[in-house]
Image: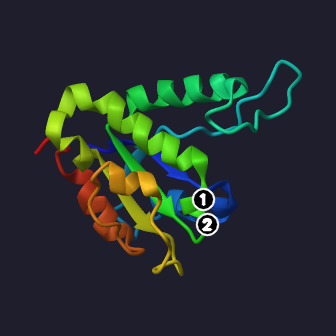
Amino acid sequence: MPTNVFISYDHDDQDQVNGLKAIKYNPNHELDFHDHSLKDPVRDPYGKPIKYPPNDYRSKPVRDEIMKKFEKASKLVVLIGNSTYRSEWVDWEVLTFFEMKKPISGVTTWKRIRGMNLKGCDNATMPAALGSARSTQPLNWDPEALDKWLDENPNG
């Protein structure tokens, strides 16, 4: 049964993220998951995308929408590109997901979060929040290894 996943990433890496999401439709790959990430930007009442950092009160609609998605996801995948470590949103997503799942998983909550370096980014700096969430070491680009991790019980 496919795992419910939220994918966190720096939006500069959108093309590679789309490539990963497309792999699940390729019959030659076993990667399978239900993506609960935001499909479109959250917009203000005037139709403009809300682009404030997570600590800005004006970003509350975005935070609220992401938290709704977290409720449906059992795992968080952080796709790490060369500048992901600078993303305030990625750090916020990791820490918030961890705190939301902690009542369910307790000391094993970190097993619900996994980073994977994007193709060509094997030496990318890991976002600070992945270290503070005690996440496992990020995978280098390997959709098959990611699929195996997605199939593991997050509380096991």
Quadrant into which the N terminus falls: top left
Q: Amino acid at mark 2?
A: Ser
Of residues 132 and 138, the one drawn nearer to the viewer in this rendering: 132
Q: Residue at position x 37%, y 73% from top?
A: 142
- Mark 1 highlights which residue? 86
Q: Residues within 10 Å of mark 2 (few under 14, many from 20)?
A: some
Q: Residue at position x 34%, y 51% from top?
A: 132
Q: Going by the image, does 144 lie left or right of 15?
A: left
Q: Is residue 64 above or below residue 154?
A: above
Secondary element under disc 1, as helix, strand or loop, is helix
Q: Is residue 80 above or below residue 68?
A: below
Q: Residues within 10 Å of mark 1 (few under 14, many from 20)?
A: some
- In the image, which disc is placed on residue 83? 2
Q: Residue 51's spot in the image, x, y percent?
A: 76, 38
Q: Going by the image, does 92 lie left or right of 95?
A: right
Q: Residue 95's spot in the image, x, y percent?
A: 41, 40
Q: Residue at position x 51%, y 76% from top?
A: 119
| Picture quadrant where residue 42 is located | top right
User: Is there CB contact under 8 Å for labels 2 and 1?
Assistant: yes
